[in-house]
Image (cartoon, rainbow, N blue to C red):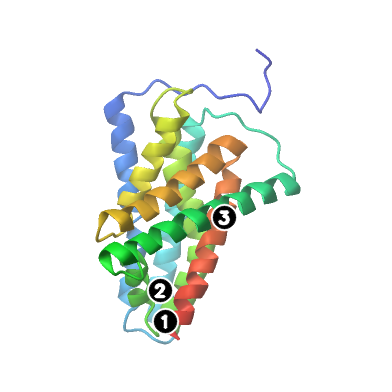
Amino acid sequence: MENNRWLVHQRPSTSLWKRVLIMVGLGLVIQLPPTILLALHNHRHFDRLTWSILSVYLVAFVLIILLALKVYRTYDRHVHRPQGFGKRLKWVIGGYVAILIGEGFLSRLNYLLYHETSTANNNNIAQLMGNNPVTVITMGLTAVILTPIAEELIFRGALMNLFFKDNSVVWQVILSGLVFGSEHASTNPVSFFIYVYLGMVLAVVYVKSGDIKNSMLLHALNNLIAMMVLLNGIH
């Protein structure tokens, strides 16, 4: 076997329970930043206390990213392929078209069956931001920059390398979608599957393109457009 950087890495031998605990830990810590941001709910100006809370929020996010990156690099075993701008663009645009089609159908189904025009997760985000400029700016920036990096490293980079054999791509994609969906608030099965489907599309882009940066960019694009829609609804 040729020895170069694009070949698959060997995963260290780790017990199943340890891998499960690693994933549970990552799934819990990614919920920490939004909890910290709740402390800014009644702070509408950038005063000293606000900056202190924001500092804790950002430091927590960075530490989570570094932790997830370490796990990803330790267990990474997918083939890495060189990517040009054109190829990245095709994966991102193609992935977003798939998201639009699938989520459009599921959102319509959610409305027909449960009369919901928005998911509980989006409602929670809108409520967290409110009309508070501090949380609007903070959530807007982190949702497009830090959240895609952290969540892709956890739910694609770590999760898809921690479990199953190298040739079990379908099961990796399904597991990634299910865990990703469980991390987002839902009130019914269709709402839940909206996030499962999103996670599965991101997983396919990651594993098929051979570069986690592509799923990060797709995730960032999806969040950017979602935030624009939410902000338009708030204001």
- Give the label, 3 or 2, closer to the camera: 3
Q: Are marks 3 and 1 in contact (CB under 8 Å)?
A: no
Camera-nearest residue between 47 and 64: 64
Asked if the residue at tag 2 contacts the one at tag 1, i.e. Cβ–Cβ closer than 8 Å, the answer is yes
Q: Which residue is mark 1?
A: 48
Reading the image, the residue beneath label 3 is 96
Viewer-side label of 3, 1: 3
User: Residue 126 versus residue 37: which sits nearer the camera?
Assistant: 126
Q: Position of residue 151 (x, y in %)?
A: 44, 51
CA distance for labels 3 and 2 = 36 Å
| Neighbourhood count class around disc 3 (C-alpha, 10 Å): few under 14, some 14–19, many 20 upward | some
Q: Amino acid at mark 3?
A: Tyr
Residue at 68% x, 23% y is 4
Q: Is there a contact, CB below 8 Å, between mark 3 and mark 2?
A: no
Q: Disc 3 on helix, strand or loop?
A: helix
**Sequence-first disc among 3 and 2:** 2
Question: Which element type, helix, strand or loop, lies under badge 1?
Answer: helix
Where residue 183 sits: x, y (%)? 32, 53
